[in-house]
Image (tube, helix red, strand yellow):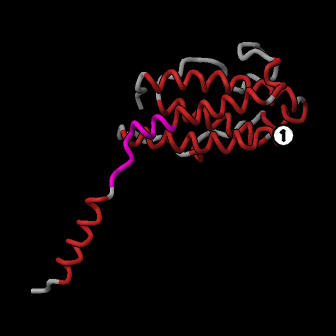
Amino acid sequence: MCWRPLCRFLWLWSYLSYVQAVPIQKVQDDTKTLIKTIVTRINDISHTQSVSAKQRVTGLDFIPGLHPILSLSKMDQTLAVYQQILTSLPSRNVVQISNDLENLRDLLHLLASSKSCSLPPTSELQQLESLDGVLEASLYSTEVVALSRLQGSLQDILQQLDLSPEC
């Protein structure tokens, strides 16, 4: 009888018994902390205070507005749209916020996998067709409205996380 495979298995088993999965509460706490950090970053950009998130701006209807986000999937889709908008803006103000959104989406994917949900990958999300034309016409307005609405959406997501959202 060959003992080598059995010894390897036992060695691997002992190693795996010490490895622990990240508690889902820690992931949820990290998600909330990152949301608060992003909101603080948006607040630090002074010109975002000049527009209400509820205000309608002609031509910027593609930017998600305030609405109750009920599922992790909807949260991820909304954040993906904002991330797409922010990465299209040439402003240096939004680079870190865009990176934070990527990390936030990763945390949402972890939360979803803990509930045995699968969120659609970014490649399946549709590209914003009207974005290029709007950016040429009103770059500053797009940034202000996008950040203002993102801030409101993040606050909605923060509240929804306390309610343990569905897939």
| Residue occupying the far front of the picture | 18
Residue range corresponding to the magenta coloring: 20-30
Q: Secondary structure at mark 1?
A: loop
In the depicted view, which residue is nearer to us: 101 or 121? Answer: 101
Q: Quadrant of residue 63?
A: top right
| Residue 160 spot, x, y in % from top left | 48, 23
| Residue 31 spot, x, y in % from top left | 52, 36
Left or right, residue 89 beside residue 66: right
| Residue 52 spot, x, y in % from top left | 75, 15
Q: Quadrant of residue 145?
A: top right
Left or right, residue 119 beside residue 105: left
Left or right, residue 12 beside residue 130: left
In the depicted view, which residue is nearer to us: 167 or 30? Answer: 30
In the depicted view, which residue is nearer to us: 39 or 18? Answer: 18
Q: Quadrant of residue 57?
A: top right
Q: Which residue is mark 1?
A: 91
Where the N terminus falls, by quadrant? bottom left
Say few, some or many: other residues with alpha carbon within 10 Å of mark 1 (under 14 / 14 to 19 / 20 or more).
few
Which amino acid type corresponds to the residue marked 1 in the rendered image? Ser
| Residue 99 spot, x, y in % from top left | 67, 45
Q: How many numbered marks appear?
A: 1
Q: Residue at x 68, y 39 (%)?
A: 83
Q: Residue at x 78, y 33 (%)?
A: 130
